[in-house]
């Protein structure tokens, strides 16, 4: 297992804003690194919070395969934790299935909600309790392609983020949102979002290390998105719209990278270790 700590992650928002190199523009291909996809087995550890760092949650994005992700969301060990899995179309980068559930004491998923996407009709259907044999409880036309699930904490970028020679090109994406609260519809289509390249932060090798984008769209106002220049995964994100109830806005920061499937297995199995029986 290889563990890479992002030691100054909590200071990165102001540092990135101050240090971004003006040389990184859409017409500067000489500073762009070769694209290098993250290896299956990699786990990206993020912290989601409000902009002021309150209400932190650990988000672990695990690359199961080039077309599969698994995401754990938790406040702390021995507390209720979500485990969400997803499969993707390798050509379009859009989710075909998503399964939401809880993490049990055996390190396995207790599935509760099942989302399916039909690329031909662009319909998203959600079922609760069972994936088959029942009419969907929720159904909506997907947002513009490639659509992303906002409450999946931008995990899709770990597989399909722009990188390499395409890493500084403007791009668009659609957002949907599951909102398990009484103050709004439980499943929302947020619409189309534009990501406009702003600048690049160069590494010691003179090549782009992070690419920064300004994101605009319904409810986000103007957000900031930093992507890894080689693989396209999220390094930092700051939006005005929260993606879960109980938040005022949205902040996501990468704090460490773990390599190897054993690290993921250990994470799942250790969550309830030494916890009292009544914790779950």
Image: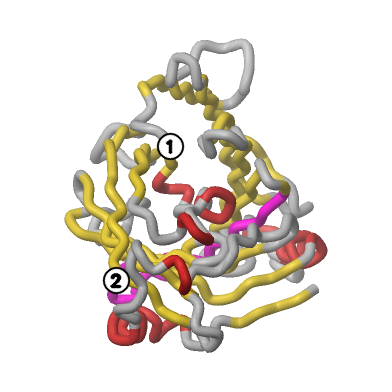
Residue 173 visible? The answer is: yes
Helix, strand or loop at disc 1? loop
Mark 1 or mark 2: which is in front?
Answer: 1
Neighbour class for label 1 at 10 Å: few (<14), some, many (≥20)?
Answer: some
Q: Residue at x 34, y 78 (%)?
A: 23
Give the color scheme: rainbow, by chain, secondary structure or one colour: secondary structure
Question: Residue 215 location in percent, x, y?
Answer: 27, 56
**Does the magenta run of residues contain 215?**
no
Q: CA distance from mark 1 to mark 2?
A: 27 Å
The answer to whether 257 is drawn above or below residue 187 in the figure is below
* Mark identifier at residue 154: none
* Mark identifier at residue 51: 2
Q: Is residue 94 left or right of residue 51?
A: right
Q: Is residue 50 left or right of residue 119?
A: left
Query: Label 2 near label 1: C-beta < 8 Å?
Result: no
Neighbour class for label 2 at 10 Å: few (<14), some, many (≥20)?
Answer: some
The one of 5 and 50 positioned closer to us in this rendering:
5
Q: Residue at x 44, y 66 (%)?
A: 29
The one of 224 and 182 positioned closer to us in this rendering:
224
Q: Main secondary structure of the magenta part?
A: strand
Question: Residue 8 location in percent, x, y?
Answer: 48, 87
Q: Residue at x 46, y 73 (%)?
A: 31
Q: Residue at x 74, y 61 (%)?
A: 264
Pick the quarter of the image with the C terminus.
bottom right
Pick the quarter of the image with the N terminus.
bottom right
Residues shaded magenta:
46-64
Q: Which numbered disc, 1 or 2, marks the residue that appears first in the sequence?
A: 2
Helix, strand or loop at disc 2? loop
Question: Residue 246 location in percent, x, y?
Answer: 32, 57
Q: Which residue is mark 1?
A: 146
Residue 60 visible? The answer is: no
Question: Residue 66 location in percent, x, y?
Answer: 68, 46
């Amino acid at each position: 297992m290889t563990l890479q700590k992002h030691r100054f992650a909590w200071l990165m928002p102001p540092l990135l804003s101050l240090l971004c190199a003006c040389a990184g523009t859409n017409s500067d291909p000489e500073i762009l690194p070769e694209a290098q996809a993250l290896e299956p087995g990699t786990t990206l550890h993020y912290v989601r919070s409000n902009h002021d760092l309150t209400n932190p949650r650990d988000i672990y994005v695990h690359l199961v395969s080039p077309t599969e992700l698994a995401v754990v969301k938790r406040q702390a060990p021995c507390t209720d934790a979500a485990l969400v899995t997803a499969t993707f179309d390798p050509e379009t980068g859009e989710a075909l299935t998503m399964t939401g559930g809880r993490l049990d004491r055996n390190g396995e998923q207790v599935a509760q909600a099942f989302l399916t996407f039909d690329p031909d009709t662009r319909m998203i259907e959600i079922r609760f309790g069972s994936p088959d044999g029942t009419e969907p409880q929720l159904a909506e036309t997907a947002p513009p392609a490639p659509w992303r699930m906002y409450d999946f904490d931008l995990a899709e970028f770990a597989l399909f983020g722009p990188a390499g020679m395409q890493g500084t090109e403007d791009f668009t994406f659609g957002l949907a949102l599951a909102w398990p609260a009484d103050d709004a519809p439980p499943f929302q289509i947020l619409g189309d979002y534009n990501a406009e390249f702003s600048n690049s932060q160069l590494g010691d090798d003179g090549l782009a290390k992070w690419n920064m984008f300004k994101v605009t769209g319904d409810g986000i106002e103007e957000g900031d998105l930093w992507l890894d220049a080689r693989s396209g995964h999220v390094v930092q994100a700051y939006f005005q719209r929260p993606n879960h109830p109980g938040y005022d806005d949205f902040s996501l920061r990468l704090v460490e990278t773990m390599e190897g499937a054993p690290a993921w297995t250990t994470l799942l199995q250790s969550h309830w270790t030494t916890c009292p029986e009544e914790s779950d």
